[in-house]
Amino acid sequence: MQKITVTISEACKLSGLGRSTIYKLFQSGDLTPRKCGSRTLILVKDLENYLNNLSVSDAA
């Protein structure tokens, strides 16, 4: 069974983004943090959607 949510640390590992970038994405509304008690979770599908919608670089 695959996870549907990840912690901020796990999101960093999965995406290659830094912790401060994840927090900036929360502030800009590009990612929505979910709270379960004191834990902050991110839906994997939201993270995937964000990454899939980034512009594609022409650099090789």
Image (cartoon, helix red, strand yellow):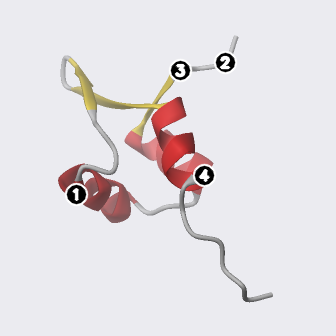
Q: Amino acid at mark 2?
A: Gln
Q: CA distance from mark 1 to mark 2?
A: 28 Å
> Which residue lies under the disc numbered 1?
28
> Which residue lies under the disc numbered 4?
52
Q: How many marks?
A: 4
Indicate the secondary structure of the residue bearing disc 4. Answer: helix
Q: Amino acid at mark 1?
A: Ser
> Which residue lies under the disc numbered 3?
4
Indicate the secondary structure of the residue bearing disc 3. Answer: loop
**Marks 2 and 3 close (CB-CB < 8 Å):** yes
Q: Earlier in the sequence, mark 4 or mark 2?
A: 2
Q: Earlier in the sequence, mark 1 or mark 2?
A: 2
Res. 39 image quadrant: top left
Q: Mark 4 against mark 2, which lies toward the viewer?
A: 4
Around disc 4, counting alpha carbons within 10 Å, would you say few (fewer than 14), some (14 to 19), or many (20 or more)? few
**Marks 1 and 2 close (CB-CB < 8 Å):** no
Around disc 1, counting alpha carbons within 10 Å, would you say few (fewer than 14), some (14 to 19), or many (20 or more)? few
In the displayed orientation, state which residue is furthest to the top. Answer: 1
- The quarter of the rendered structure image containing the C terminus is bottom right
